[in-house]
Image: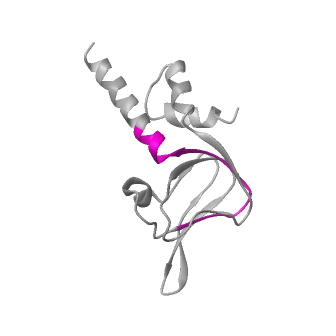
Amino acid sequence: MKYKELKKQILSVAQFTDNELLKICSFFKPNYYLQKDFIVTTGKISKEIHFIINGLIRVYYLKAGKEVTSYLATDNDFVSSYSSFINQKSSFENIQCIEECETLAIDYENMQELYAIISNHILSKFNQ
């Protein structure tokens, strides 16, 4: 049941068979965070992209010593410090749970593997 909404999100941008969708979802691992837990803090590398099953998450950074909220993510949203995740460099953002949160997360290494699988899948369809 946890993966139902993730599957819907994936299918909203591309078509996959049930078996392909199961394979994709197998790369995502469940996480649970308490209110006020940090998923990423400034200076750390964002190692995961999270799909929020339920909860509210705030992305913010510091500017002149003040917190600036750049994004609020809730049920069925994806959240990460994307520039940090993609480049595997330190984040300038903090990602904090506003309330208890349940997510499905894919780490950087699994995302790279998934990119390769999907690329091969797409290429094989073009070569048919």
Q: Residue at the spot x=57%, y=39% of the render? A: 28
Q: Quadrant of residue 89?
A: bottom left
* Residue 98 belongs to the span the image colors magenta: yes
Q: Residue at the spot x=48%, y=70% of the render? A: 43
Query: Looking at the figure, which quarter contains the N terminus?
Result: top right
Q: Residue at the spot x=63%, y=53% of the render? A: 74
Tell me: 113 left or right of 38.
Answer: left
Residue 69: percent from the left, percent from the top? 54, 71
Tell me: 37 left or right of 87.
Answer: right
Relative to 103, does residue 97 appear above or below in the rendering?
Answer: below
Residue 27: percent from the left, percent from the top? 54, 35
* Residue 55 belongs to the span the image colors magenta: no
Residue range highlighted in magenta: 94-112
Applied colour scheme: one colour
Residue 23: percent from the left, percent from the top? 52, 26
Q: Nearer the viewer, residue 47 or 77?
A: 47
Relative to 112, does residue 124 appear above or below in the rendering?
Answer: above
